[in-house]
């Protein structure tokens, strides 16, 4: 990931107080409203670079699990990793003290390998650690090559970058916590999806496949990456209501009686009621999926008998993903269908059970869908 690079002649002097305030307000507002970690890191790097008029600015973070430092915001490079404590940035982070030098090649702590690989010439460097709300060092800013005529970072630059570091460290911790919470929610949803899917090994990786199929279909239908990812994360909860259905029904090897089938159908409404009161967007999406994935395009589905576009697009997508995978999987009450038979049914149900557009995208994306089926095949499935 790259940040914008200031042209060499862009600045002749340091920024005025008015320019500095404008930059600070602009970037802090963007950082405060951003939840995606990579975007926050790019904004932090650009804030630091512009505040001290540097050619480049890199944001380094600590990976405690691997005892390393890493950055994903470095011009002309992907992720870079170095051992914790190594180099100028490692020294600044391990000691918690800022470092600024006029010529990197005169300091034995500087590692010139990146310069050799890229042809870049590092001269002046300023490295400022940043801390979380508990005062623990969690990373550092590293500004490289001052662009003013003096070409050396000043004590005032250190004050400015320290200001950016003080704000960014706390904002970054909040963003990382938000990202961790979202990932934890996704893991819980996936685990609960497995429980709701019948509490049986025979269902294997059904919820994982449905999630991936749903994502592929959502992207094919023109959804944004974030919305498609939301559906992928929510769709594993489509059968969460089955936690309230007796095992005698869920695992019955033969055909259900009319009364048993009516009881089975209740899982859609039960799943919705379990999830609907959450204020989390992800769980609200899961509630929609749970409630509507058994609705049919022609209005003959359940529990509400919705038809056409009155069915939420999440429900229409998950309906096809779920049926496709269920038909191709062995269950206690049936053998897996052949792919030829499944595709024939999908085409036959276009405009009846399934949204015609979703079917069309499904057929267009069939190679990708079959790749997912192979990748997440059930453990008991034979070749």
Image: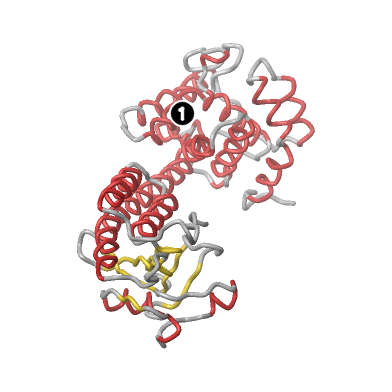
| Residue identified by numbered label 1 | 290
Residue at screen point 49% across, 38% down? 226
Q: Position of residue 266 (x, y in %)?
A: 44, 23
Residue at screen point 42% across, 42% down? 189
Q: Position of residue 270 (x, y in %)?
A: 39, 26
- What's the image's color scheme? secondary structure
- Does residue 352 appear to the left or right of 235 in the view shown? right
Task: Determine which quarter of the picture holds residue 45.
Answer: bottom left
**Closer to the camera in the image, 338 or 251:** 338
Residue sticking out furthest to the right: 340
**Closer to the camera in the image, 173 or 32:** 32
Task: Describe the element under mark 1 as helix, strand or loop.
Answer: helix
Q: Position of residue 144 (x, y in %)?
A: 42, 69
- Does residue 92 appear to the left or right of 301 in the view shown? left
Packing grade of label 1 (10 A; few <14, some 14-19, many >=20) is: many
In the rendered image, the vertical position of residue 63 relative to residue 328, given as above or below: below
Q: Position of residue 364 (x, y in %)?
A: 73, 33
- Does residue 338 appear to the left or right of 221 in the view shown? right
In the rendered image, the vertical position of residue 41 relative to residue 58, given as above or below: above
Q: How many marks?
A: 1
In the rendered image, the vertical position of residue 274 relative to residue 15, given as above or below: above
């Amino acid at each position: 990931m790259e940040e914008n690079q200031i042209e060499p002649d862009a600045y002749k002097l340091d920024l005025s107080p008015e320019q500095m305030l404008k930059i600070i307000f602009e970037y802090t507002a963007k950082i405060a409203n951003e939840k995606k970690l990579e975007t926050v890191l790019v904004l932090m790097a650009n804030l630091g670079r512009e505040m001290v008029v540097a050619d480049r600015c890199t944001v380094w973070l600590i990976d405690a699990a691997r005892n390393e430092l890493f950055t994903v915001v470095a011009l002309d490079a992907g992720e870079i990793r170095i051992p914790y404590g190594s180099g100028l940035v490692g020294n600044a982070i391990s000691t918690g003290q800022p470092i600024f030098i006029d010529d990197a090649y005169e300091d034995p702590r500087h590692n010139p390998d990146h310069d050799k690989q890229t042809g870049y010439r590092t001269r002046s460097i300023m490295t400022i650690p940043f801390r979380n709300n508990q005062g623990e060092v969690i990373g550092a800013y590293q500004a490289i090559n001052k662009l003013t005529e003096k070409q050396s970072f000043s004590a005032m630059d250190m004050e400015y970058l320290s200001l950016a570091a003080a704000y960014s460290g706390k904002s970054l911790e909040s963003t990382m916590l938000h990202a961790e919470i979202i990932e934890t929610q996704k893991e819980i949803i996936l685990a609960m999806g497995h429980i709701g899917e019948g509490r049986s090994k025979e269902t294997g990786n059904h919820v994982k496949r449905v999630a991936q199929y749903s994502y592929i279909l959502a992207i094919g239908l023109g959804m944004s990456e974030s919305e498609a990812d939301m559906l992928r994360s929510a769709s594993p909860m489509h059968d969460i209501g089955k936690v309230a259905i007796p095992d005698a029904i869920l695992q019955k090897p033969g055909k259900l009686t009319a009364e048993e089938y009516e009881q089975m159908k209740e899982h859609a409404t039960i799943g919705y009621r379990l999830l609907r009161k959450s204020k989390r967007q992800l769980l609200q999406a899961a509630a929609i999926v749970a409630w509507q994935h058994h609705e049919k395009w022609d209005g003959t589905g359940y529990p509400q008998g919705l038809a056409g576009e009155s069915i939420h697009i999440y429900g229409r997508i998950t309906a096809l993903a779920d049926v496709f995978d269920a038909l191709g999987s062995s269950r206690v009450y049936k053998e897996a269908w052949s792919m030829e038979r499944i595709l024939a049914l999908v085409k036959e149900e276009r405009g009846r059970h399934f949204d015609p557009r979703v079917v069309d995208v499904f057929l267009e994306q069939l190679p990708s869908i079959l790749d997912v089926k192979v990748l997440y095949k059930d453990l008991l499935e034979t070749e």
